[in-house]
Image (cartoon, rainbow, N blue to C red):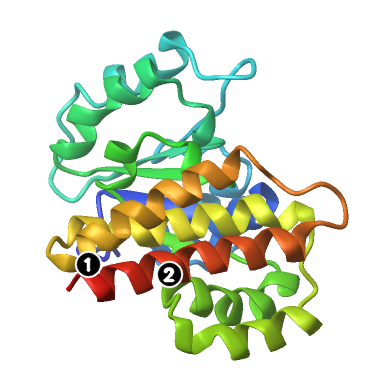
């Protein structure tokens, strides 16, 4: 019934309706004796968010409070039976404050047997990095982003001066929008933070790229300025790459 390889802490990134639609069949497949039939009592209760094995958390206001997260501490204090499982779904996880996020670190790092945590966020760059580092991350894209994102991120995951011509050509036809800018920045921030934690020479480069990405959040493009924004950011990352190669 249950895949023991499922990570105890996960981060699902994407637009809220896309992520939440994916969570229903995911949890149904885990708990349903027929691997997610959609019609049994368990599947129906999961669909109506009334199944005891899946606990949904949503902030009451515009950020999580200590009271919002107390249910995790309360429920996880009980030892589950062998083979029993409980999933906490933390929606809009970017609304966790520093205090509430830190309060969850211990239970995420050393989860009691059978407890699992799925953080859902559209803006993962706003989540406490120590939370993100403990999670296995999955990206969920709309059809609009499925075609654009892989090719786009390729240039910013490998920002070399040899890519200048190809990148310039890509920007001529890419349908970049201001709305997608923060989402793309978030995905790049997740990628480069992972590179930083690998250590070595790549870590030095990653730390400088991360700083450029953080600075970029403060200078988000005005309407019509997305392409220029990304061109300038790419040139800055290429400059960092050239300087490091020269120093070596």
Q: Quadrant of residue 66?
A: top left
User: Would you say the residues marked 1 and 2 are in contact, meaning their CB atoms lie under 8 Å apart?
Assistant: no
Q: Quadrant of the C terminus?
A: bottom left
User: Residue 33 appears at what percent x and percent y?
Assistant: 39, 64
Q: CA distance from mark 1 to mark 2?
A: 42 Å
Q: Residues within 10 Å of mark 1 (few under 14, many from 20)?
A: few
User: Residue 9 appears at what percent x and percent y?
Assistant: 29, 47
Residue 202, labelled with which disc? 1
Report whether 119 appears left or right of 136: right
Residue at position x 24%, y 27% from top? 76
Q: Residues within 10 Å of mark 2 (few under 14, many from 20)?
A: some
Report whether 42 appears left or right of 79: right
User: Residue 73 appears at what percent x and percent y?
Assistant: 28, 19
Q: Nearer the viewer, residue 188 or 47?
A: 188
- Going from N to C along the chain, the mark reached first, 1 or 2, is 2
Spot the residue most to the top: 67
In the image, is residue 37 above or below residue 115?
below
Report whether 1 appears left or right of 11: left
Report which residue position mark 2 lands on. Answer: 35
Residue at position x 40%, y 19% from top? 69
For the residues carrying marks 1 and 2, which lies nearer the camera in this image? 1
Residue 29, labelled with which disc? none
Q: Quadrant of the N terminus?
A: bottom left
Q: Is residue 80 visible?
A: yes
User: Residue 235 appears at what percent x and percent y?
Assistant: 55, 68
In the image, is residue 142 above or below residue 57?
below
Q: Is residue 24 visible?
A: no
In the image, is residue 73 above or below residue 184?
above
Q: Secondary structure at mark 2?
A: loop
Residue at position x 21%, y 60% from top? 203
Spot the residue most to the front: 246
Report whether 162 appears left or right of 58: left
């Amino acid at each position: 019934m249950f895949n023991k390889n499922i990570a105890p802490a996960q981060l699902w990134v994407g637009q809220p309706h896309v992520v939440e639609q994916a969570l229903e069949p995911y949890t149904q497949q885990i708990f349903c004796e027929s691997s997610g039939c959609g019609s049994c009592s368990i599947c129906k209760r999961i669909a109506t968010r009334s199944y005891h094995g899946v606990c949904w958390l949503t902030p009451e206001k515009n950020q999580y409070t200590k009271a919002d997260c107390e249910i995790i501490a309360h429920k996880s204090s009980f030892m589950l039976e062998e083979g029993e499982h409980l999933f906490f779904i933390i929606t809009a996880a970017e609304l966790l404050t520093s205090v509430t996020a830190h309060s969850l670190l211990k239970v995420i790092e050393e989860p009691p047997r059978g407890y699992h945590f799925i953080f859902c966020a559209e803006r993962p760059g706003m989540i406490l990095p120590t939370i993100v580092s403990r999670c296995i991350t999955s990206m969920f894209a709309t059809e609009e982003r499925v075609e654009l994102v892989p090719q786009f991120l390729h240039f910013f995951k490998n920002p070399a001066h040899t890519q200048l011509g190809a990148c310039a050509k890509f920007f001529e036809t890419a349908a970049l929008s201001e709305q997608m800018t923060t989402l793309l920045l978030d995905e790049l921030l997740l990628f480069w933070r992972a590179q930083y934690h690998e250590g070595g020479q790549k870590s030095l480069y990653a730390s400088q790229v991360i700083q450029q990405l953080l600075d970029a959040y403060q200078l988000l493009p005005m309407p019509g300025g997305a392409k220029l924004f990304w061109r300038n950011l790419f040139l800055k990352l290429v400059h960092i790459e050239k300087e490091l190669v020269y120093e070596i």
